[in-house]
Image (cartoon, helix red, strand yellow):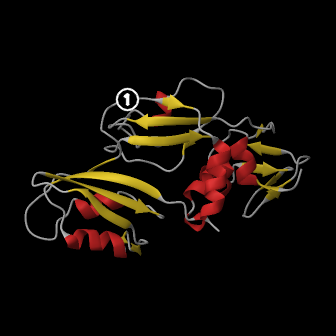
């Protein structure tokens, strides 16, 4: 077995997400062969002894789990909700399984639609990291008409939290006096990017926040996903 980054190994062992492992390292909570891991990158081998908070980590080859969830509105795609909110999480809707799974990407609380939950780190990386160029498609239902300037803002990108986003492919799929529907394809998604643009019309007046996702019904459909096809698609996208 080749060397592996310690974040990946601990994630596959079910200890925490890779990002949380990095925080544990900064907090001095991880020992490698008796020494505190103080910096990254850190690579480990099968014979290495790793302890987290003093507890020995049992290395195991993880069985991958894949779940497709039709997320209802009001459910959050996070492992730990913000303090005092205690909202239902996507992982709470999945039948009890003996694996730590997480959402691949996220839909915000008010959005509905299909989201993948898994413990497959490689697939998650290929589907979510911008360097692989895998597009995400959203349908946004907004009150009133959508102005050309709003689509232009999506297409050219915008500044969110001080950073410019990549442009999106945006087109109107239904235009009405009371309601419009817009399809947006993003290679890179930022926090509430679609809502931030479409909820703020260029001219005066107010607009209800757009509802992104599927048909808005609170179904909780689960199904197995064909992983080889997803991996093949993600590899093709980055060529």
Q: Is residue 129 left or right of residue 203?
A: right
Q: Is residue 217 visible?
A: yes
Q: Is residue 79 visible?
A: no
Question: Could you tell me which quadrant the C terminus lies in?
Answer: bottom right
Q: Residues within 10 Å of mark 1 (few under 14, many from 20)?
A: some
Place residue 126 in its image quadrant. bottom right
Of 175 and 45, nearer the camera is 175
Q: Position of residue 198 (x, y in %)?
A: 24, 61
Q: At 31% from the left edge and 44% from the top edge, which residue is drawn?
A: 110
Q: Is residue 131 left or right of residue 48?
A: left
Of 41 and 61, nearer the camera is 61
Q: At 36% from the left edge and 35% from the top edge, which residue is drawn?
A: 72
Q: Is residue 169 left or right of residue 140?
A: right
Place residue 189 in its image quadrant. bottom left
Residue at which label 1 appears: 219
Q: In what element is the residue under mark 1? A: loop
Q: Is residue 70 above or below residue 126?
A: above
Give the residue at the far right of this rendering.
47
């Amino acid at each position: 077995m080749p060397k592996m980054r310690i974040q990946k190994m601990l994630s596959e062992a079910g200890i925490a997400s890779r990002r949380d492992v990095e925080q544990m390292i900064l907090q001095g909570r991880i020992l490698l062969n008796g020494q505190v891991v103080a910096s990254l990158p850190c690579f480990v081998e099968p014979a290495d002894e790793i302890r987290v908070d003093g507890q020995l980590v049992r290395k195991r080859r993880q069985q991958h789990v894949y779940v497709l969830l039709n997320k209802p509105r009001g459910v959050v795609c996070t492992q730990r909700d913000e303090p005092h909110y205690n909202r239902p999480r996507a992982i709470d809707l999945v039948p009890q399984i003996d694996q730590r799974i997480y959402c691949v990407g996220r839909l915000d609380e008010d959005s509905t639609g299909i989201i993948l939950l898994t413990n497959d780190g490689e697939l998650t990386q290929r589907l979510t990291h911008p360097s692989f160029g895998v597009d995400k498609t959203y349908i946004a239902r907004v009150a009133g008409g959508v102005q050309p300037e709003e689509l232009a803002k999506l297409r050219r990108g915008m500044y969110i939290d001080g950073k410019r986003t990549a442009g999106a492919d945006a087109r109107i799929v239904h235009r009405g006096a009371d309601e419009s529907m817009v399809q947006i394809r993003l290679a890179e998604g930022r926090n509430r990017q679609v809502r931030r643009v479409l909820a703020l019309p260029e001219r005066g007046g107010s607009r209800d926040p757009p509802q992104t996702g599927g048909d808005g019904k609170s179904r909780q459909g689960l199904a197995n996903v064909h992983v080889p096809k997803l991996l093949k698609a993600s590899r093709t996208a980055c060529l």
